[in-house]
Image (cartoon, rainbow, N blue to C red):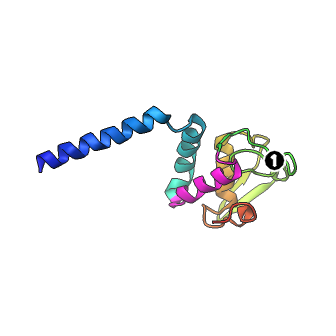
Amino acid sequence: MKLFLLGFSIVLGAVFFVTEARGSIPQDRAKTWRIVSHTFGPYGTSVRAFGVTGCETGRKYNRGARNSTSGTTGIFQIHPDWIGRIIRWGRRAIRVRNNLHGRWPNARYALFLSKGGRDWSPWAAVCRR
């Protein structure tokens, strides 16, 4: 049993080493995952939310992502028409500020727009899965 565990550790270490040699997860992707998992994690929807950010940013996870045609901005591509509006979700409400490019506010607005990650219809036209 000890030999098996030692062999497994060596193989696992080799896989990790090879992954690191090719290049680690891009910094933008790691930051986006941290924010999405922190924001959507309590609702159990962080994996789906992260998938939406990948779809919306072309798998680049860039907080400055912007659609020049529609004007949508950020990791969740929130439309600037939301600026100044209040998004309601249950008893909670949030006012959208002019900070759509920031990862944290963009994720928080998406949390409210998606009702805790339960309704992805605003993203359905682009991100089908």
Crowding around mark 1 (Cα neighbors within 10 Å: few <14, some 14 to 19, many 20+) is some
Q: How many discs appear?
A: 1
Q: Judge left or right: residue 72 versus residue 108.
A: right
Q: Nearer the viewer, residue 41 or 22?
A: 22
Residue ID for mark 1? 67
Q: Position of residue 41 (x, y in %)?
A: 51, 54
Q: Residue at x 33, y 38 (%)?
A: 14
Task: Check disc 1 and report its element: helix, strand or loop.
Answer: loop
Q: Judge left or right: residue 60 versus residue 71.
A: left
Q: Nearer the viewer, residue 76 or 98?
A: 76
Q: Position of residue 51 (x, y in %)?
A: 60, 55
Q: Quadrant of the C terminus?
A: bottom right
Q: Nearer the viewer, residue 39 or 50?
A: 50
Q: Residue at x 64, y 56 (%)?
A: 52
* Mark 1: amino acid: Asn
Picture quadrant where residue 15 is located: top left
Q: Residue at x 85, y 45 (%)?
A: 68
Q: Residue furthest right?
A: 69
Q: How would you classify the magenta stretch by its main secondary structure?
A: helix
Picture quadrant where residue 119 is located: bottom right
The correct choice, above or below, for 81 with respect to 18 in the image is below
Q: Position of residue 95 (x, y in %)?
A: 75, 50
Q: Nearer the viewer, residue 9 or 104?
A: 9
The correct choice, above or below, for 115 with respect to 16 in the image is below
Q: Residue at x 57, y 39 (%)?
A: 31
Q: Position of residue 69 (x, y in %)?
A: 87, 50
| Start-end of magenta stretch | 43-59
94 falls in the magenta region: no
The correct choice, above or below, for 22 with respect to 44 in the image is above
